[in-house]
Image (cartoon, rainbow, N blue to C red):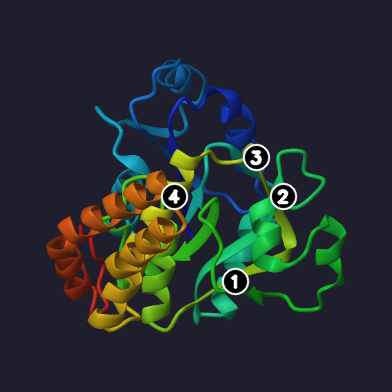
C-alpha cells in the first residue's frame, strides 16, 4: 500500500526532527510531502539541507490548513497513492501506527477516516481534546478496550488516515474554512456520504500542543467557525442549516442583550452578519457537495 504523508508547516523548526524522524522509523514505509505556508523561520533552509529525501513545496503565502492540504491531496490522487496520512507539524507517531491503520482501513471500508490514540506532547496521557471525544482520561484506559476499532462522531485532524476512496467520495477541504473548522466540516461531509470515523486503541501519536484558556476574542472566533460549520452542514436541510447558523447567532445576540452583555451582543451580531454575507457561497458549496466526487481536489 503506497502512502503519502502530508504535513502542513509554518515555522516547523521546533518539531521538525521529532516529526520527520518518527515517519522515517515507521514500520510501514511512507512518502512524505511537507507543504510550507510561508514560514518566517529557517524551515525552508533546514528542510532542503537536512531532509533532501522529503518532498518540500513552498507556498508564497499562507493558504491555511485546508488550502495547503488540498494541494497534497490533489497530488495523491494524480500520482496514484492508495492512502494519505495527514500529520500535524507539532505531532509524531509510533512505529506501528501506519501499518495498523492501513490494515484496519482494508478490513473496514465503511470508515473514511482512521486515527491512532492522541497523546499529549509528554506521551504519558491523552491529549485533552481527544480525552473529551473518547471519555478516557488515561493512556492505560485504552488498553482495556477489546475492539480493534472504536467509532467516534468526530476526531480532529492531527492524525488522519484517509484511503483514496474517501478522497474520491468526499474530496478535499472546503474553501469556506481558512484555518479553523476545516476538519469539523470535512467530518460532516463524510457522514453525509455514509462513512464513519474511528480510532485504533492499539497505536499512538503525540500532539505537542499547548492548551490555554481562551480569551473572549478566541471564544468568538470559535463561535463563528462553529456556526459556519452548522450553516454549511449537508446533513441538514437548508432551513435547519440557516436556523443553526445565522439565526442561532442572532438568538445568542438577543439573549446577551437581555442579560445586559453589550459586548457579547455586538460580537454575535457581527457573527450573524458575516454568515449572512457568506450565504451565497454557502449555498453554492452545499449544492456542489450533493454527489460523490473529489470536490476541490480534482486533478
Distance (Cα) linking label 3 and label 4: 49 Å
* As drawn, 252 above or below 60: below
Query: Which label sits on residue 198?
Result: 1
Instruction: Say which element carries label 1.
Output: strand
Instruction: Say which element carries label 4.
Output: loop
Q: Find disc 4 in the rendering and name its residue.
A: 261
Nearer-the-camera pick, 277 or 270: 270
Mark before the other along the chain sequence, 1 or 2:
2
**Residue located at (69% from left, 50% from top):** 127
Nearer-the-camera pick, 32 or 128: 128
**Residue located at (46% from left, 34% from top):** 54
Q: Where is residue 285 in the image (x, y as percent from the top left)?
A: 20, 67
Q: Residues within 10 Å of mark 3 (few under 14, many from 20)?
A: some
Q: How crowded is mark 4: few (under 14 residues within 10 Å), some or many (20 or more)?
A: few
Instruction: Say which element carries label 3.
Output: helix
Distance (Cα) linking label 3 and label 1: 22 Å
Q: Where is residue 3 in the image (x, y as percent from the top left)?
A: 48, 55
Nearer-the-camera pick, 210 or 269: 269
Marks 3, 4: nearer the viewer: 4
Q: Find disc 3 in the rendering and name its residue.
A: 22
Mark before the other along the chain sequence, 4 or 1:
1
Q: Do the residues labelled 4 and 1 touch (CB within 8 Å)?
A: no
**Residue located at (32% from left, 43% from top):** 68
Marks 4, 1: nearer the viewer: 4
Q: Are marks 3 and 4 in contact (CB under 8 Å)?
A: no
Distance (Cα) linking label 1 and label 2: 16 Å
**Residue 297, can we see it?**
no
Q: Find disc 2 in the rendering and name its residue.
A: 119
Marks 2, 4: nearer the viewer: 4
Amino acid at each position: 500500500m503506497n502512502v503519502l504523508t502530508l504535513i502542513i508547516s509554518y515555522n516547523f523548526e521546533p518539531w521538525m526532527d521529532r516529526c520527520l524522524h518518527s515517519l522515517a522509523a515507521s514500520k510501514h514505509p511512507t512518502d512524505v510531502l511537507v507543504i510550507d505556508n510561508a514560514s518566517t523561520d529557517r524551515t525552508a533552509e533546514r528542510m532542503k539541507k537536512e531532509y533532501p529525501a522529503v518532498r518540500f513545496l513552498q507556498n508564497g503565502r499562507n493558504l491555511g490548513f485546508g488550502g495547503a492540504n488540498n494541494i497534497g491531496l490533489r497530488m495523491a490522487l494524480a500520482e496514484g497513492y492508495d492512502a494519505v496520512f495527514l500529520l500535524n507539524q507539532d505531532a509524531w507517531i509510533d512505529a506501528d501506527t501506519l501499518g495498523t491503520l492501513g490494515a484496519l482501513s482494508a478490513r473496514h471500508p465503511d470508515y473514511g477516516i482512521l486515527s491512532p490514540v492522541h497523546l499529549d506532547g509528554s506521551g504519558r496521557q491523552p491529549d485533552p481534546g481527544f480525552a473529551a471525544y473518547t471519555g478516557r482520561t488515561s493512556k492505560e484506559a485504552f488498553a482495556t478496550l477489546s475492539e480493534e476499532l472504536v467509532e467516534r462522531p468526530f476526531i480532529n485532524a492531527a492524525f488522519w488516515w484517509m484511503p483514496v476512496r474517501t478522497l474520491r467520495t468526499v474530496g478535499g477541504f472546503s474553501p469556506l474554512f481558512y484555518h479553523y473548522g476545516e476538519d469539523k466540516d470535512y467530518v460532516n461531509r463524510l457522514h453525509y456520504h455514509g462513512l464513519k470515523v474511528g480510532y485504533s486503541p492499539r497505536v499512538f501519536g503525540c500532539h505537542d500542543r499547548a492548551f490555554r484558556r481562551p480569551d473572549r476574542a478566541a471564544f468568538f472566533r470559535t463561535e463563528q467557525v462553529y456556526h459556519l460549520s452548522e450553516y454549511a452542514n449537508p446533513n441538514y436541510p437548508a432551513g435547519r442549516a440557516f436556523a443553526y447558523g445565522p439565526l442561532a447567532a442572532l438568538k445568542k445576540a438577543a439573549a446577551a442583550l437581555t442579560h445586559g452583555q453589550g459586548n457579547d451582543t455586538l460580537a454575535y451580531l457581527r457573527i450573524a452578519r458575516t454568515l449572512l454575507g457568506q450565504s451565497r457561497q454557502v449555498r453554492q458549496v452545499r449544492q456542489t457537495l450533493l454527489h460523490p466526487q473529489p470536490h476541490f481536489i480534482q486533478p
